[in-house]
Amino acid sequence: MANWVVDPLPHVPAGFTLEDPVLRPPLRHEVCVTGCYTLYNEDLAIIKLQPSVHKEDFEHLKTALRTFFHDVHQVCTTEIQPCALGDAYVRFSSSLERERFLGPVFKFGNYAMSIIKHDEAENARSLIWIVLPGCY
């Protein structure tokens, strides 16, 4: 692991402030970003199929996924796009509808289909969020 000196100020989103951490002696300089934040893409999921579908066959996969969600499960999806981390991104009309499909493995033709949250793929980073009172 390498550490570089970085000025975090240009990377702070509007409405956020920088505060130095407290209650422990710093081994290196650490900065905490605080403020209210809005969750995005809570209605987005990644579809993974076993075996994987070739990217050239995406239009057929898109049609089959639309049929699976709309006709079989009566769930509205707003968009289906190709995904580098799986076989497809699916945006549901709400995060509650996405939650219905997280966890179980579905039979999808000759495939085993699993659905994961957009931020829990292989490239997920560990980040600790501190929710401040009154900020949702």
Image: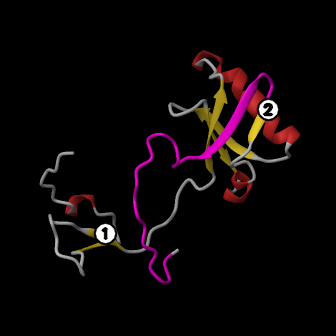
Distance between the Cα atoms at labels 2 and 1?
43 Å
Q: Residue at x 55, y 47 (%)?
A: 118
From the viewer's perspective, is residue 64 above or below residue 117?
above
- Going by the numbered disc 1, the residue's amino acid type is Val
Q: Check if residue 110 falls in the magenta segment.
A: yes
Q: Is residue 62 left or right of residue 89?
A: right
Q: Is residue 57 left or right of residue 64?
A: left
Main secondary structure of the magenta stretch: loop
Question: Quadrant location of residue 7?
Answer: bottom left
* Residue that mark 2 sits on: 107
Q: Nearer the viewer, residue 134 or 47?
A: 47
Say which label, 2 or 1, has the lower sequence index: 1
Protein image colouring: secondary structure
Q: Check if residue 13 falls in the magenta segment.
A: no
- Going by the numbered disc 2, the residue's amino acid type is Lys
- Residue 11 lies, in percent from the top left, at 26, 58
